[in-house]
Amino acid sequence: MANNNSKNRKAILVTPEVCIGCRGCQTACKSWNQLPGISTKNNGTFQNPPDLASAAFNIIRYNEVPSQKNDVRWLFVSRRCMHCEDAGCMTICPAPGALYRTEEGAVAFDRDKCVACKLCVTACPFDVPRYDAEGKVTKCHLCFDRIGAGMEPACVKTCPTGALRFGDRDELIGAARKDGFTTIYGEEDLGGLGSIYAFKEEPKLYGMKENPAIPSSVIFWHTYLKPLSVIGLGGVVAAAAIHYLAVGPHKDEEEEV
Amino acid sequence: MAEMVRKSSADEILNHWILAVSCILLIITGFAFLFQMESVGSVFGGFNTMKTVHNWGGVIFSLSLLYSMRHYLKDAFEYDADDRQWFKVAGGYLSKNVKVPPMGKYNPGQKLYYLAILLAGIAISLSGFGIWLMKENATVMLLSHLVHNVAFIIFVIAVPVHIYLSTLANPGTFRIMVSGTLPLETAKKKYPKWMKAAGKM
């Protein structure tokens, strides 16, 4: 599933340091994608809804990380689909076209083609895909309908601080480096993510997953079991044909001894 | 007309064909899911319908598999010295110059084939139900997905071997799964110990 035009690969660059936690991105996403509101309860944090949902393709995580120097420290991180180059969801999906790669390198979905098996949920290293009430996959699709028409994703368009930026992936990484961000989360992980994060501190501090990976059983299945099923079937059919020609069928007369 | 002996009952033959048809349907749709074969999907009118066919075909397959135990399970666990000798000469399949020991109703290859299909069948059924019905448990889903695919490989290797050995490789065998009977003279040659036990020779 390699993205063959990586030169054109687009990405969202998240810079949590400049995020003010306004949640404009959440609202803009709902507005553009016509997603309904979610009824939630106050569970002691401003993070709301508490996690991604079928009606919440992106959320801001409100990480409370007090330290000795700073006993009130709030770190805001936009969470959404990472649009992995090596996407576990696409690898495991049994339905052609249900999850697909756009020209810009995003992982988008087609509800009508989804067969509601939920295997993508188990194969995602970031626990992103959600199923709606009708049992169909939903998630951030990088506003493929907007970017295909030359616009920015809705969340980026509305972001007032530049914490979300959209553009050419290589250029975004270069710009972040120039601005002094030493760690670009997702630059190399899973073949390179389409949602990349610029940090000056440890990504772990912001609650980013360390060494994200597709489950090893899925990689084993994809690398060995899938080819083996074809080799196995072809092998025994060939062996039967060779046996028929070389040894030949059993004849009752020959059994007389 | 030559005297015939009955090897398979009507019940067994019906069970066999329900198992066979559901199994092949599951293998074809299984390959379609594995490699996202749109052409196969379109035969069923799309992947959503094909999933329904695959799931309910699996229910028919698992029930038929469990039912088949009443026909074969007892025999599949009984092996004697002739059976061991059968393996040493590879059942006579690799050379016609070996002496194949006298066999009972089933040869040990058939008995082991049954046990392999039974075990792989139980594994592929349980894991299939895991993927179908336990979607909220990621561990069950991943484990089931792995087991389902390992068992699938056992099936795509074992089933064609079974089809070859029961048709082209052993002319005259296929009719046992159609009429259930074969000529007494043939049965005496192929299953002497079974015929002796039945008092026919």
Image (spheres, rainbow, N blue to C red):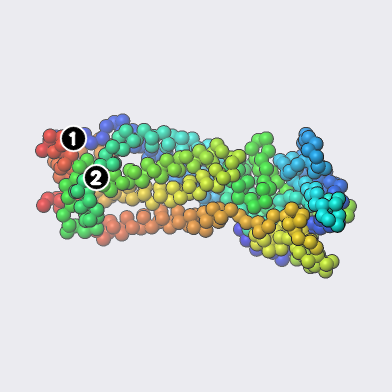
**Chain under numbered label 2:** B
Q: Nearer the viewer, residue A41 or A87?
A: A41
Instruction: Locate residue A138 relative to residue B160 in the image: left or right.
Output: right
Kind of residue at disc 2: Tyr
The local crowd at label 2, few if under 14, some if 14 to 19, many if 20 or more residues have their Cα within 10 Å, is few
Residue B66, image quadrant: top left
Q: Which residue is mark 1?
A: B5
Label 2 belongs to which residue? B79
Kindly report the distance in space between the C-alpha atoms of the residues bearing marks 2 and 1: 23 Å
> Do residues under tags 2 and 1 come within 8 Å of each other at their CB atoms?
no
* Residue A189 locus on image (x, y percent): 67, 61
Q: Quadrant of residue B132?
A: top right
Residue B98, percent from left and from top: 17, 57
Q: Secondary structure at mark 1?
A: strand
Q: Residue at x 31, y 50 (%)?
A: B164
Residue A40 lies, in percent from the top left, at: 77, 35
Which residue is at a point 11% across and 52% down the rendered structure image?
A257
Query: Which x, y percent locates residue B116?
Result: 36, 46
Regarding residue A222, the answer to whether it shows in the image is: no
Q: Residue at x 36, y 55 (%)?
A: A236
Disc 2 on helix, strand or loop?
A: loop
Residue lying furthest front: A68
